[in-house]
Amino acid sequence: MSFYTKRRLAFATQDLQQPVQMLREFVAAHAGTTLWGIWHGVFGMASNELMLVTAHDEQEDGLALPENVRVAEVYQLKATARPTDNMPLSQAGIYVFRDFVLDGKDIEEVVALSSAAWQTFEAGENYAAQPMGLFAPQTPSANCVMHLLTWYPDFTSWQNSRESGPEALQRFAARRALTYSTNAVATRLDLS
């Protein structure tokens, strides 16, 4: 599976235990769709929101969510350098969703720069980090969004990774030069 759908969902309540269970059951009942993960916001998301990412064989997952679920954002994506499989994520820690607004013609270069930077970025001496996914829009345009999801065990690792090795920093700076803007949201994977 190389297609993914990323949704930012809003609910009428801040108690998200029942909505999470409902989403798990809803996706499980949908053939051909795998739940890649559900995330609660730490910062950058409202307390009544969840991030839902599904993996699927077809370009769209075909989920018609119940009426009590408001879809704030939805993106139809394809995997690039990562992930290499559709196994649901399961590691506790901090997951940072970073969105890059860029010209679609620069997607391949962003993927190459990211992949090269990760070679040293993931080997930090005073932090742990692992890019879990880098996604491109299924239909790139002159003003489109790429989506990166990176795992850290905690915020200390996230902070220390801001000073990763010079090779990674140089490639991240080159990637940044190709983007119009970026936005980051810190989350925790729901492990229930």
Image (cartoon, helix red, strand yellow):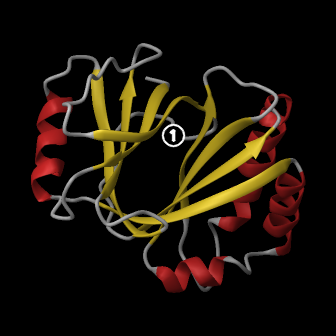
Residue 88 can be seen in this image: no
Query: Which class describes the residues within 10 Å of circle 1: few (<14), some (14-19), or many (20+)?
Result: some
Which residue is at the far top?
Answer: 58
> Image quarter for residue 183?
bottom right
Q: Is residue 56 above or below residue 80?
A: above
State which quadrant residue 136 falls in: top right
Residue 28 visible in this rendered orientation of the protein: yes
Task: Say left or right for 134 vs 2.
Answer: right
Identify which residue is drawn at 32% across, 53% down.
50
Could you tell me residue 100's position as x and y percent? Answer: 70, 49
Viewed as shown, does residue 146 lie left or right of 3?
Answer: right
Q: Nearer the viewer, residue 114 or 135?
A: 135
Q: Position of residue 13 (x, y in %)?
A: 18, 59
Residue ID at (67%, 39%) = 145
Residue 174, image x and y in percent?
89, 56
Check disc 1 and report its element: helix, strand or loop.
loop
Residue at image position (29%, 30%) is 34
- Label 1 belongs to which residue? 83
Q: Nearer the viewer, residue 81 or 52?
A: 52
